[in-house]
Amino acid sequence: MAKQKILIADDEAQIREILRIYFENSGFEVCEAENGAEAITKLRTERPNLLLLDIMMPVMDGIEVCKQVRQMSDLPIIMLTAKDEDDDRIAGLEIGADDYITKPFNSREVVARVKAVLRRSGGIKGGKGGKKRLTFPGLTIDLEQYIVEAFGRRVTFTAKEMELLWCLASNPGKAFSRNQLLETIWGYSYYGDTRTVDTHVKRIRQKLLIPQDSAWDIITVWGIGYKFELK
């Protein structure tokens, strides 16, 4: 079986070296980029399975790299951010990053988080009975073909967006707390930082363009979280 490949894009050589050692010891193949422009080039030539992307880089920063990647693929992206880069972290999630890790980090935790994202992006499990398709007026979610059609348009989702939409839509009327969604979709706790759920729901809504007369909607349950509601 071919090794999964990680592209590490960070302008600090020491960070790339440490992460390379941990990833290679965990059975991954690793390629590196020291700035955003090189990361875009390596994405095309190396075809990695996941991009580990620092926000603060020369030539082209991680936010711009993430934007460009999302225009051409749904490749899993994990952002590396400093503790005081709160706005950039949220911006990264809003434009399509799957996850973020705050510096300084534990290298073993980085590997574990990468494995979790790859495991989930490799194939979303169906619902009860192995169900792979949901249909509502104006909406079809097909996990077998990885397709969402909304109001006559085909909509492209990242793995996390698709999994979050499936979780809500396969349980119509059920209110999920943000922490429940974190545990279900991301597989671990953010220790109370639930903004990643909010930014993913925001992107899903923006992509679906739900009209006011729709027979369903993704509803905010104030003080709790979200639910997929049939009207």
Image (spheres, helix red, strand yellow):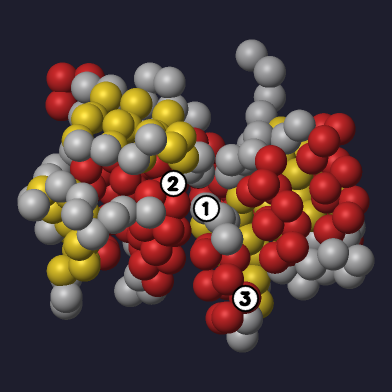
Q: Residue at x 88, y 43 (%)?
A: 41
Circle 1 Cα neighbour tier, 10 Å, few/some/many (<14 / 14–19 / ≥20): many
Q: Position of residue 136 (x, y in %)?
A: 19, 35
**Visible in this render: residue 200?**
no
Q: Residue at x 30, y 31 (%)?
A: 140
The answer to which of marks 1 and 3 sits earlier in the sequence is 3
Which residue is identified by label 3?
88
Residue toward you, 30 or 95: 95
Q: Residue at x 38, y 20 (%)?
A: 144
Q: Quadrant of residue 24?
A: top right
Which residue is identified by label 1?
98
Q: Secondary structure at mark 2?
A: helix
The answer to whether the residue labelled 1 contacts the one labelled 3, judged by CB atoms less than 8 Å apart, is no
Q: Residue at x 89, y 69 (%)?
A: 58
Q: Position of residue 22 (x, y in %)?
A: 69, 46
Q: Is 63 placed above or below 39 here?
A: below
Residue toward you, 188 or 23: 188
Which residue is identified by label 2?
160
Q: Is residue 116 left or right of residue 100?
A: left
Mark 2 → mark 1, Cα distance in angstroms: 6 Å
